Amino acid sequence: MKLKIGKLKVPVPIIQGGMAVRISTANLAAAVANEGGIGVIAGTGMSPDELRWEIRSARELSSGIIGINVLFAVRDFALLVKTAIEEGIDLVISGAGFSRDMFTWGKERDVPIVPIVSSARLAILAEKMGASAVVVEGKEAGGHLGTDRMMREILPEVKKAVSIPVIAAGGIIDRQDFEEALVMGADGVQMGTRFAASVESNASDEFKGLYVKATKDDVVLINSPVGMVGRGLKNDFQRRIEGDKSLEIAECRGCLKKCSKIYCIMEALKNACKNGNHAEALIFAGEKVEKIREILTVREIFKRLLGG
């Protein structure tokens, strides 16, 4: 059941999703790495110095495999990826796009680069450019979505099309989901929503409580300034987005390469980590969030996934 990505030998084929902004920080990444999976720090929305600090903190807490995830749409994408590589990060995951340059950066320092894709065509392109693996994410995932197709539809197509490891993502919450993905041919899984509702997650208590109380009817698609739809939960902020054509941005920092400026997504996602600020928070969540009924430690999540 081990997973091999480039030079990395992963004892347990579970990658923790890189949930921005500041949901996936050092504490969560280290806890996942300590259980034998790949712990991931979400670099999106961080400064290079913040990212350095998070990587160093994770290293102090774990000797396991630590990666980063950076949204390709952010203006500082190259700077953040290069900073992480200089810090000796084990793995780089790129969401919402990729470029030829990032594979060159990884090759220069022998760091595996793993893009998130939503089609066999993109997977083939990524492999040709030098990807060490691909994450195949379906519409069941939380956060920004690159497709309206289910992961179980896309996964077999990608497996046939490439020879590098293929990681399944989207809608994986419990042991049944995990085992089904492996049976379908996945070499491993990436899980975000379940780990967002962990003790070690940097999400606020209010955020985690919404996950525990969520029903299927609470899960909606949300327009994003990034130019993609996202999947998340109904709340006051989401209803304001739906009702208004745009929300006032107090101060635009120009953090995205392209932004519709309908609202400030960085601030909305940061507020998800702050108790008492949920009237201004965007709560991303996966399609199967209703399966989560308690906040667990990372250790307990792994135990249940592996049938321990």
Image: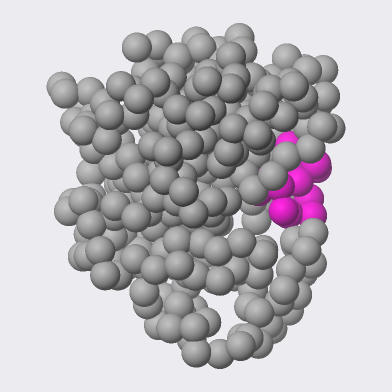
194 vs 174, left or right, is right
Q: Where does residue 188 sit, x and y in percent of width and height?
A: 42, 23
Asked whether residue 201 is in view, the answer is: no
Q: Image point 49% across, 70% down: which residue?
A: 222
The residue lying toward the viewer, choosing from 127 and 10, is 127
Q: Would residue 205 be found to the left or right of residue 162 on screen?
A: left
Is residue 240 placed above or below 224 in the rendered structure?
below
Q: Which residue lies furthest to the bottom in this view?
A: 244
Residue 259's image quarter?
bottom right
Q: Can you give x and y, in whole percent of width and height, for residue 291 in the image?
A: 21, 51
* Towards the viewer: 119 or 145: 119
Q: How is the image coloured?
A: one colour
* In-front residue for pair 221/268: 221
Indicate whether 274 appears above or below 175: below
User: Residue sitting at 55 percent across and 56 percent down?
Assistant: 144
Residue at 58% x, 22% y is 161
Is residue 129 visible in this depiction of the protein? Answer: yes
Magenta stretch containing residue 139, yes or no?
A: no
Quadrant into which the C terminus falls = top left
Is residue 61 shown above or below 10?
below
Is 70 one of the magenta-colored residues?
A: yes
User: Which residue is depicted at the point 53% across and 33% down?
Assistant: 135
Q: Position of residue 48 (x, y in %)?
A: 74, 45
- Residue 250 in the image: state x and y as whole percent: 69, 83
Quarter residue 239 falls in: bottom left
User: Which residues, given as a range, are shown in magenta?
Assistant: 68-82
Q: Quick one: 293 or 131, which is closer to the camera? A: 131
The image quarter in which residue 296 lies: top left
The N terminus: image quadrant: top left
Q: How many marks?
A: 0
221 to the left or right of 73 = left
